[in-house]
Image (cartoon, rainbow, N blue to C red):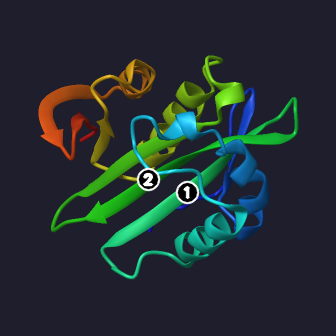
Amino acid sequence: MIRTGAIGTARLELLPLAVEHAGEMATVLSDPALHMFIGGTPDTPEALRARYERMVAGSPDPAVSWCNWVIRLRADACLAGTVQATITASEDALTAEIAWVVGTPWQGRGIATEAATSMAGRLEQQSVDTLVAHVHPDHRASAAVAAACGLTSTGRWHDGEIRWQRNLR
């Protein structure tokens, strides 16, 4: 079982996702531009609350763990985004598919990199064998975050995105 306790960095606190975060996160994630590469539209506060309720309840599949954190900026005492890992157990390995999103007002400050690398470090400490991310080929900022986490492009495509990977063990 992977622990999703708080993770601290110099500027950030990664807090385990709670349903109560939905209201503030609906505002953080409200810019339609955040969906340019992933599609869809921003969730309403109600829809995000319902999604967070499902996420906090955990995966119905015992071989899959959902680890989700909100990114809290220490200096501003506000939420700025999320990081997440979907961890799948196979016969002899744990694979974590990781993702991140930072609200538009906080982009370009290294927040996604700081949060994602901290999460990756926590996962490595907890015996995850492989990190995977799927990045849209035109999303240079996300590719830079994946690279900062030590992932490299595999050149393999998955649902219009390129698979990035790092073997930890």
Residue 143, by quadrant, is: top left
- Residue 149 shown left or right of residue 42 in the figure: left
Is 84 located above or below residue 76 in the figure?
below
Decide: few, some or many residues near mark 1? Use Cα within 10 Å; few <14, some 14-19, many ≥20: many
Does residue 16 appear in this view? yes
Q: Which residue is mark 1?
A: 68
Query: Which residue is found at the position 50% from the left and 32% from the top?
Result: 117
Q: Which residue is mark 2?
A: 85
Badge 2 vs badge 1, beta-carbon distance below 8 Å: yes
Mark 1 or mark 2, which is nearer the start of the sequence? 1
Residue 12 coordinates in the image, percent (x, y): 72, 34
Residue 139 coordinates in the image, percent (x, y): 38, 24
Q: Amino acid at mark 1?
A: Asn
- Residue 134 shown left or right of residue 34 in the figure: left
Is 26 located above or below residue 150 in the figure?
below
- Extreme residue toward the right, this view: 76
